[in-house]
Amino acid sequence: MKFSLFSRQRTLRHGAVVLALFVITPLFLTARNHSARTHAPKHDALKHNAPKQDGAMVLAKVGIESITYQTLEEAFRKNLNNKNARLSALSPDSLRDFLNLYINYRLKVQDAQARGIDKKPEVVLDIAQNRASLAAPYLFEKAIVSPRVDASLERRKQQFRVGLIFSKIAMPDTTRAYTRSLAMLKLLQQGADFKQLAKDSSDDEYFRNTGGEMPMVTSDRILREIENAAYTMKVGEIYPKPIRSNLSVPGYYVVKLLTMEARVTVRGRYINIKRNEQIDSATAENTAKKLADSLYAVLQKGGDFAELAKKFSNDVYAEYGGLFPSYYSPTTGYLNGLRYRFPESVDAWLMDSKRSNGELSQPISTDKGYYIVRRDSSKIGGDEREEMKRFYKRVHFENDKKIFFDSVKKARKYALSQKTFDALMKALDTTRPAFDSVQKTKLPAKLMKEELASFTGYKLTVAAFADSLLQRSDLRGFSLTKQGMMQALDKVSEAAITDALTKNMEKDFPDFAALMKEFQEGILIFRVEEQEVWSKMKFDSTKARAWYEPKKNDYRTLVMYDFSEIWTNADSTAQSLYKRLQDNMKTAKPSATLFDSLAMQFTERSGFKERKGRWDPLDARPYTIPEEFKKRASKAGDILPPFKFQGGTSIPRLNAILPERVKTFEEAIPDFAAQFQDIQQRELTQKWLESLRAKFPVSVDEAALKRVRQ
C-alpha cells in the first residue's frame, strides 16, 4: 500500500491542494513493499598510512611516453572505481602486475597510432559520434545537475515548517485569487493573526483546520517555489508576494516561515512486536505488551539487541538484527532511497532533542505494534548523493534544462523570425500527419533560403530545419500545427546551442578531455586488436585435436537412457494398454514386439507413431522420463506403470542404459572450444605484445618502483 506524506500515522483530513504541494512521488512505503537491503560500510583495504609519493616520479617509459606515479595511480583508481585508492598501498608484486598491465595498454595504443588507425575516416567518425553522445550529458551534469544536487544536499542539513494560506484560481478569472492573496498580505503586514486568517480565509479544508500549518519538511519535499521562499526568509517572516502553483489545483499561496532548524538523521536498531490479529484484541494486546516488556528487561541487563531482533521482531529487517538500512529522517525516510516511515510516536522518540546516542527506548505502543528502539548514532543531513541525483533527474531535470536553455538563448541573443515561421506554416499542408519529403519539395525555393532562427554564431534556414525534420528520428512525431512546429524548432535550436556550448569542452573541462581520451584509446585498441588477434582466431582442428588428446578423459558423456514411450491424453486408454502389456508378460511366450506395435497404434505424441514411440537417448534430468527410470533403478526391458507426464499419461519402456564414455573429438568440441580459443587469444596477444616491446622499447625504473613502498 502506498502512503502520501500524512497518511501514515496521521488522521488529518485534507484535499488535493495539500497533496499537490509535495513532490509527486510515492514518498513513504511500508517496509514489506521493499526487498530488505543492508548497506554495510565499504571497507577499503587500500586506505592505510601508505607513504605519499611524488606524482611526477617516472616509473617506466614506453616508447616516447613516460609513465609517472600520478598517471599510474589515476589509472589504478579508475580501474577500482575508488578515488581514494593509493597505489603505494599495493604489495610489490601487485604493483608490478598493475604496471605491466598499464604498459601493455600503452603499447597497444601506440601501435594503433603508428598504424594510422586514428586517422581512418570510419574511426574519426566513430570518435566524433562517441563525443557527441558524451558531450551533452557531461555539459548538463556540470551546468545543471551537480550544482542543483549540491544545493539540495546543503539545504537538507536543515528542515522547516511553513504556514500557508491558499487562494484557489477559478478559471477563467485568474485575477481574483491573486488580488485576494495581495489583500491578505496587506492584512498580515498590518498585524493580522496568520493562523486565524488561514482558518477564516483559506480555500482549502486542511489549511482551515490547521490554521495553515504544514508538517516539517526538507529540500525537495514541497513545492519548489515555496521551498525557495523558505530558505530566503527568517523565522516569523512572511514572503512579500503570493506564490503561484499550477499543479492539480491552481492557485496562490501566502507563505510564512514558522520554524527552520538543523535536520538530524539517525541510525540504530529496532524490534517490532506486532499484535496477533487472529485472536481477540484484548488478548493480542496483552500478549504483545508482555513480550515487549520482557525483551526490554533483557536489553536493560545487556542482552544482545541484534539476536533478540532476529528471534522476536516481526519486521523485514529482523534478519539483519533490526539494523536501520541507512541513516533515517522523518522528513524523507531512510537516506538510501527507501521511503519507509516509522510511526509518528517512534519518530518523536528518535528525534527528541534531549535524546542521546546509545539510548534505549521503553516499548512504544503504535497501531503497528510495540517498538523497542535503540538510537546508535546521529549526524546533520548526510543524504546519499547518488540517490539525490536520481531523484533530481526524475523530478526536476527536464524543467531545469528548459530554464537553462532559455537563459543561454537570452545570453546568446536568440531570435526567431516570426515572419518566416508564419510563411512556413502557411506553406505546409497541415492535413498531412507529419512532415515528409513530399512536403519539402512543395516549399518555395525562396522560402527555403530564409533565416528562421539565429543566435550568436549560428543561423538556421528553413531548408536546414526541413532537413532536420526529415533526418532526426526524435522530430518525426511532431504535428504540423504551430505548437508542434515550434516544439520541433526548439529541439533543433537546443541541439545547436548544445553543439556551441560543447565545442571547446576538452579545453574547458580537463575531466572531459581525459574521458574522451579514454574513449578514443578504447576505440583504437578495439580496432588494432581486431587486426592482430580476433581476425586470426580461426578454429584449427589439427591444433585443437592435439590439445584435446591428452585431456580427452576430462570430456565424458553422461549416463544415457534409451527408451520408448506410449503417451495418451486419456488416462483410461493408458491403463487399458498397460494391462495388455502386463498380461503379455504373464504368457508362456511373451511378445517382444507388442510394446512397439501398441506405440505405433496408440501413442499420441506428435511425430512418434512412425518411430514406435522411441526417443533419442537422454540423461536423467529432473522432470524427465529417464529420471523416473533412475529413481526406480530400472533395468533394460522394464515397463513403468502409467504416470502423469507433460499433460497426458505416459507408459515408458527402458530399452537400454548407455554407460558414460569418453567423448569423441567431434562431440567434445562444444565443451572445450571456448577454452581452446581463449588460450589461442592469449598466445596471439602475447606474441603481439612481444613484437611491440621490440618496436617501442620499454624500460622500468626499478629504483623508483622500490621507492613507491618506502
Image (spheres, rainbow, N blue to C red):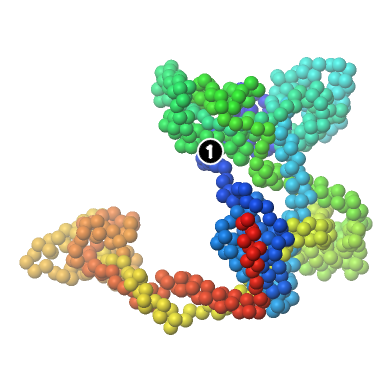
Up the image or down, 191 lies above or below 671; here it is above
Q: Residue at x 57, y 42 (%)?
A: 41
Image-based side of 507 in relation to 53, left or right: right
Q: Is residue 275 visible?
A: no
At x 57%, y 49%, the residue is 45
* Residue pictured at 91% horizontal, 64% vertical: 450
In what quadrant of the picture does the C terminus appear? bottom right
Residue 295 image position (x, y, % from top left): 44, 23
As drawn, the residue found furthest toward the bottom would be 542
Give the image location of residue 573, x and y in percent: 23, 58
Q: Quadrant of the N terminus?
A: top right
**Depth order, front residue of 254/39:** 39
Residue farthest along the left direction in this orientation: 588
The local secondary structure at tag 1 comes to: helix
Identity of the residue drawn at 14% across and 60% down: 582
Residue that mark 1 sits on: 33
The relative height of residue 135 versus residue 665 in the rendered view (above or below) is: above
Q: Position of residue 629 (x, y in %)?
A: 24, 60
For residue 78, side relative to residue 578 (left or right): right
